[in-house]
Amino acid sequence: MTDLFLGYQNKISAQQLQQFQQGLIEGNFSNSIGKRINYCYYPLANAKATVVISSGRVEGYLKYLEVIYDFHQQGYQVFAIDHLGQGLSERLLADSHKGHINDFNQFTDDFSLWLNKIVQPKCQGTLLLLGHSMGGAIAIDYMLKYPQDFAAAALCAPMLGIKLPAPKALVKLLLAVLLKLGLKNKYILGGGKYDPEPFAGNELTGDAKRYQWFRELYLEHPNMQLGSPTNGWLDQAFKACSNNLSAASQLSVPTLIIQAGADNIVDNYSQNRFTCHAPHCQLLKIDNAKHELLLESDSIRNPTLEAIFREFQKYC
C-alpha cells in the first residue's frame, strides 16, 4: 500500500504513516468498574494547544493515525481514547464482537477520569475537543457536565439521533419488548459479528483507498474488530441522544458541528434541531459527505479539516 498517500497538506505514504506511528505513546488505565481503557498521545514540544479525540462506535485511536498526523503537522499535541468496549479497550461481554454498554454515563465517567489523570498533567495550551459520531454524543454529555474543561469543540457527524430502518416509535416499542424478555445483551435484530462490507456498498466513506487502509488495519489488529450493537447499547444510545437534545440550550462551550450531507448512520435532522437550541453552537454542512468525514476523499475531508483548524486557531 505504499502508493496510498494520506495527510491534509504534507502528504505521506501508508508506509511513512506507519513510521510516524512509532512516536505514538500508548497506555491504559482501569476505570471505575475495573475495566481496562486504552489511550494514546502524540507529544509535541512547544505545542500551541492540546487536542483530545473522542472517537465513535467501532473505532479506536489507531484508526485516527492520519488525523493525529494532520493535527501534529498543525502544531497540536494530540490525545485519543478508546472508549469502553471500543478499539483496544476491554469489552463488557464474553463475545468481544458485541458492541455493548450498560450505562452511557460510564463513557463520560471514563472520559473524565482519563482527562484528569492522564491528559491534564501533560496539557500544553488550551484544551480542544474533537469528537465523532458516538464520541460526539459522549463529548456533548461531558461538556454539559464539565463546561470549564474545554475552550472549544468540533464534532463531526455527532450522534444526536440514529438513522433507523423503521419508524422510531416502532423500533422503540420492539426494543422495549426485547429488553423485557431479558435480551439486553443480544445483538440488535439482524446484527452479528464483525463482517466488513465491500467498499461499493459501504455507508462510511467515498474514498476507496482510505476504506481499504482502515479495513486492513482491522485485519492487522483483530482485537479492534467490533460487530453490531446490542439491544442494551441501542437503549442507552436512545437515552443519551434524548438527554443531549433536551439540554442543548445549556451547552456553553463554543461548538462547531460538521454535518455529513449524505449521512445514513446518524440523523441529521437531530443535529439541526440541536444547533437551533444551542446558542454557542454553529453547524457546517458538507454536501455529498458520508458519515466518516475524517476518512472521506480529500474534496470532502480537506474542507472539514480546514473548518476545524480555523475554529481551533481562535483559541490557541
Image (tube, helix red, strand yellow):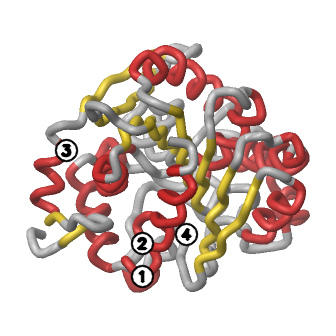
Which residue matches tag 4? 291
Q: Earlier in the sequence, mark 2 or mark 4?
A: 4
Under mark 3, the amino acid is Gln
Q: Secondary structure at mark 4?
A: loop
Decide: marks 3, 4 in contact (CB < 8 A)?
A: no
Residue 271 point in image, percent of width and height: 76, 63
Decide: marks 1, 4 in contact (CB < 8 A)?
A: no
* Disc number lying in front (2 or 4): 2
Q: Is residue 33 left or right of residue 75?
A: right
Under mark 4, the amino acid is His
Q: Earlier in the sequence, mark 3 or mark 2?
A: 3
Nearest the viewer among 180 and 121 is 121
CA gap, disc 1 and disc 3: 25 Å
- Image height check: is 298 above or below 135? below
- Image height check: is 45 above or below 258? above
Q: Secondary structure at mark 3?
A: helix
At x 37% / y 22%, what residue is drawn? 28
At x 40% / y 35%, what residue is drawn? 79
Residue 256 point in image, percent of width and height: 65, 57
Which residue matches tag 2? 302
Which residue matches tag 1? 299
For the N terminus, give its image quadrant.
Answer: bottom left
Nearest the viewer among 56 and 313 is 313
| Label drawn at residue 241 | none
Under mark 1, the amino acid is Ser
Under mark 2, the amino acid is Asn
